[in-house]
Structures are given as C-alpha cells and as structure tokens.
Image (spheres, rainbow, N blue to C red):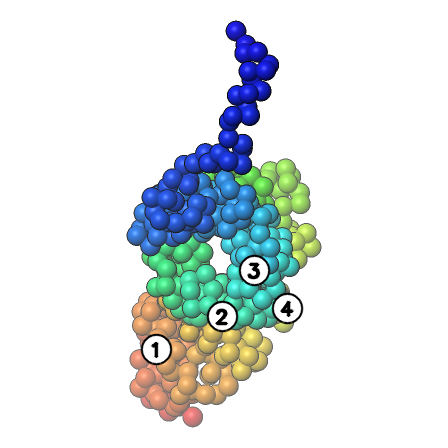
C-alpha cells in the first residue's frame, strides 16, 4: 500500500538533502583510500608501481579501470598502449593507442600516434605511413613522431630526410636506435645497420623492429642460419607479428626452400589482408617454386607455369621477371628481354627487372656498355642487395671505370658477414686494371682462401703476379687455374712459355 501523500512529504522533509548525504563510495575510491591516495590518479600511480615491480598483468587491470574515467582516459590508454607494445600484444596496443590519440593533444598525442605507426608497421597494416604523418602534425618536435616518420620516409626512398629525422629523435633507447639502423639498412650500409640494431637490442632485448631488422640484415649478408632461429623465437613471442612471418618466408626463399616458405607467406597474407606487400609475397613464393624447377632441368615446365601466372596477372611485374629468367635459362634472349623490359615498364621500382636486363646484356650478349644503366638502376632501386652492387662493380671494371668499380666493390666486401669470392675477385681485377698490382693481391688471396677450388680466383692471381713479373708465383697460380679447368687461351699460352723458361717482360 502506497503512503499517503502528506506522510510522504513529511518523510522527505525529514530526510537529509542530496547535498547532505555522503556520496556512495566507489570501488576505485575504496582502493585509493586503502592505498592512501586519491581515486583515479592513484590508479595510474599504482599501475606504474606494478610495472616497476614487474607485475604487468596487475598494471594492465589498473590502467583499464583508470581508462574508464573520462578525465583520465587519454593518459591511461597511452600507458596501456605502452604496456601492450612491450608485451607484444599488437592488436591490443593498436586499440589502446588509437583511443589515447583521440583523447590527447600535443606531445602526448604525438607519442600515441608515433607508437601506433610503429606497431601498425610491425603488424603489417598499410596505414602506418599516414599515422606517422599525423604524429608529426600533432607534435613536430617529439621523438616518437620523428621515429615513426623516419621509418616511413626510409620506406618511401627519401633517405636524406629519413636520416635527419632519425638523428632528430636523438634517443639512446631502442626505438630511436632501431629507426636509425633501419635508415642505414635501406641505404645499403649493412655494417652500420647491424651495429645499430644490436645496440637497440642491448638497450631493450625484446624490441620487435630491432629484432626483425637484425634478421633482415643477417639474411641479406648471407647469414640465414643465424636469422632463422631469431625469427622463430619472435613468432612464438608474438603470434600476430606479420613482419616476422614475411621475413621468415623471404629467408626460406633466399635459402632455396620455396616449398617451406608457402606456409609462412600464407599466414602473413591471412593476418594482414589489406597489406599489399604480404599479398605480393604469396605470389612471389609461387614464382620461386616455379624457378626451383630450373636447376632440376625442367625449364620448359617452369616456363609453362610462369606463363600461366603471367596470363592470370598480366600486370604482375614479378611474374614477368621470373619468366624472363626462365627464358634466359633456355637462351631465348629476345623473348626474355621482352618480358624483362615489360616488367621494368610496369614497375620501374622493381630492382630485379633492371638487374636481370643488365645480366642479359653483360653475361649473355657480352655488352658491358648496354648492361651498365640497368645495373645502375638496380642498385639505385635496392642499394641493400650485394649481388646487384657486385655486378655493377664488375661491369664498371670491364668498362675501365676502375675507381668507381673499386668504390662499389669495397662497400660489398666491407659488409659484415660477406663471405662470397666474387666481389673479392672483381675488386682485385679492378686494381689490376688500374695497374695497382700490389693492391690487387690481398683481395685476390682472400677470394682464393674463400673458394680454394675457384679457377677464376687462381687465374686472376696468376695475372696479378704476371703484372708484378714474379715468374714463380705466376706459374704456381696459373698452373693451379689450369688444373682446375681454366680455359682462357692467352693465360695458358703465357704459362706454357714461362714454364719453358721464357722470362716475363
């Protein structure tokens, strides 16, 4: 039964007013009271304490509660984003950093967007570059916007601007060091890049961009056996790490294991449906599988498969490059040149198209002058590929541009981990071409030590000692080249004459 209105009025009048009532104590307030602090702000302070103590789960929970309070949402979400980034929880980091950026302004917003751009890049999301631009717009002077934009500019080929941004970040911490190393990597300076990545990992062992960057450098300098376990460990720690799957697929392609690369490329493509790079990688794996037929003597089957792929994707320049290489293996030079030229037109930035055109002219048509501009374009498009720079050095030497050749080849042999004989041989020959025979000895001896069964290394040493008029060493090395199957007529004729007692004049 409802009370009489008059009684109800008396009850209301006798009751304390809303202003007189003590406010209902919230859970946050009770927690803060127990901790001896104020609600809300204290949650963030408590979370920082948990981070310092290594209790990240508790820190995440505290920050989520703080983020529920509108006045603290931005600061709490930024800290949540940092924690998720540190824990390799990429999707959670993206959500938190997006929320932080929406709620914050100025340097804090710049940090949120800068961190977001780096996580998006690692996660294989195509909007990373746009986020980096937004970070710089929010805070033109902050370190995180500089880090994010440096990485974006490096990917865009704007190397000088990228280097200036990385320097401006000026950080001794891992993200800044990794950004500077990335700029060095895309410039082809692997020695500096590797040192930078290792310095970043010394500062923060779990830094993802530095770990992936180091793996890339190891692959590109022929140390895939070191890179593979590093990538496997990264994938275990962060299953959504698209860049690690992509790099592992590329590593397996470089090691001639295209069949094994299929799964990694497929996972990357599935995790990053909107990443053109991941989708392209899956097609590159299919091309590589066809190319593996060539050393098995199945060039015709490879050509058939690559033609089918080209016809399904007529604008896929990479398929035309693969087809051009297969046609080269069958010495169908004109058909190969047509495919490679079309690939270069479809995608002028595709370094491999230019390189294969250079190789066609240099190795198959013996036309160094025609090969030179193609090799130069290949190196300009991908300065990190040592193979491209090695062949550029070789053709420069053939064209008697010895100083340029030496500069290019010296960069190759100075790269940490470089262990192939070719660049050492070409470097020695470039010095010989400039009649600097003494300077030629060291690189040629290095080549012979790397490849003791190389007739080219021994023949080059023979010619070097011929230039030095050292008959005994000429006979030693030219004789070894002959034993290894070297067929150059001029060298063998001189060897016969010197062995018969004729002096070197």
In this view of the protein, which residue sits in the foreground, 323 or 95?
A: 95
Task: Give the residue pinned by disc 2.
Answer: 170
Of marks 3 and 1, which one's residue comes earlier in the chain?
A: 3
Q: Nearer the viewer, mark 3 or mark 2?
A: 3
Q: Which residue is mark 3?
A: 107
Q: Would you name the residue on which mark 4 appears?
A: 373
Q: Is 222 left or right of 149, judged from the image as shown?
A: left
Q: CA distance from mark 3 to mark 1?
A: 56 Å
Q: Earlier in the sequence, mark 4 or mark 2?
A: 2
Q: Are marks 1 and 2 in contact (CB under 8 Å)?
A: no
| Element type where label 3 sits in the image | helix
Q: Nearer the viewer, mark 4 or mark 3?
A: 3
Q: Residue at x 37, y 73 (%)?
A: 447
Disc 1: which residue: 445
Other residues around mark 1 within 10 Å, as few (<14) / some (14–19) / many (≥20): many
Pick the front one: 145 or 7: 7
Q: Quadrant of the C terminus?
A: bottom left
Q: Nearer the viewer, residue 373 or 70?
A: 70
Q: Does the CB distance between marks 4 and 3 fall below 8 Å?
A: no
> For this view, does 241 lie left or right of residue 451?
right
Work out whether residue 15 can be spotted.
yes
**Residue 387: x %, y % from top left:** 49, 64
């Amino acid at each position: 039964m409802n009370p009489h209105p008059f009684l109800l009025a008396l009850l209301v009048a006798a009751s304390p007013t809303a202003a007189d009532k003590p406010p209902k104590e919230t859970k946050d307030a009770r927690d803060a009271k127990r901790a001896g602090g104020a609600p809300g702000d204290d949650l963030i302070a408590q979370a920082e304490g948990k981070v310092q103590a290594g209790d990240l789960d508790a820190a995440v929970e505290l920050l989520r509660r703080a983020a529920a309070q509108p006045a603290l949402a931005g600061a709490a979400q930024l800290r949540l984003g940092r924690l998720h980034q540190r824990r390799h929880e990429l999707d959670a980091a993206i959500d938190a950093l997006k929320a932080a950026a929406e709620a914050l302004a100025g340097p804090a917003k710049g940090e949120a967007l800068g961190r977001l751009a780096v996580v998006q890049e690692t996660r294989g999301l195509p909007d990373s570059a746009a986020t980096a631009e937004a970070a710089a717009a929010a805070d033109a002077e902050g370190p995180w916007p500089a880090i994010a934009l440096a990485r974006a500019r490096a990917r865009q080929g704007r190397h000088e601007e990228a280097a200036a941004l990385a320097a401006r970040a000026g950080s001794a911490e891992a993200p800044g060091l990794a950004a500077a190393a990335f700029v060095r990597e895309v410039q082809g300076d692997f020695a500096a890049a590797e040192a930078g990545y290792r310095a970043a990992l010394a500062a923060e062992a779990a830094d993802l961009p530095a770990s992936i960057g180091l793996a890339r450098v190891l692959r590109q300098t022929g140390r895939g056996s070191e890179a593979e376990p590093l990538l496997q460990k990264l994938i275990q720690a962060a299953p959504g790490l698209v860049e690690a799957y992509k790099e592992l697929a590329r590593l397996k392609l470089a090691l001639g294991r295209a069949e094994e690369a299929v799964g990694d490329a497929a996972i990357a493509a599935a995790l990053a449906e909107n990443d053109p790079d991941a989708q392209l990688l899956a097609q590159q794996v299919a091309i590589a599988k066809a190319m593996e037929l060539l050393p098995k003597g199945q060039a015709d089957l490879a050509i058939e498969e690559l033609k089918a792929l080209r016809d399904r994707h007529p604008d896929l320049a990479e398929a035309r490059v693969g087809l051009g290489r297969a046609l080269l293996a069958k010495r169908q030079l004109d058909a190969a040149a047509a495919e490679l030229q079309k690939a270069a037109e479809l995608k002028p930035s595709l370094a491999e198209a230019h390189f294969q055109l250079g190789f066609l002219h240099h190795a198959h048509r013996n036309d160094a002058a025609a090969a030179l501009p193609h090799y130069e374009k290949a190196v300009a498009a991908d300065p990190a590929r040592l193979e491209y720079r090695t062949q550029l050095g070789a053709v420069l030497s053939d064209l008697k541009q010895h100083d340029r050749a030496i500069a290019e080849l010296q960069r190759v042999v100075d790269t940490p981990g470089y262990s192939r004989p070719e660049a050492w041989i070409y470097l020695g020959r470039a010095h010989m071409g400039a009649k600097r025979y003494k300077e030629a000895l060291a690189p040629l001896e290095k080549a012979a030590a790397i490849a003791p069964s190389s007739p080219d290394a021994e023949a080059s040493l023979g010619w070097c000692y011929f230039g030095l008029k050292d008959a005994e060493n000429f006979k030693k090395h030219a004789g070894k080249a002959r034993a290894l199957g070297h067929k150059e007529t001029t060298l063998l004729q001189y060897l016969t004459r010197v062995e018969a007692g004729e002096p070197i004049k």
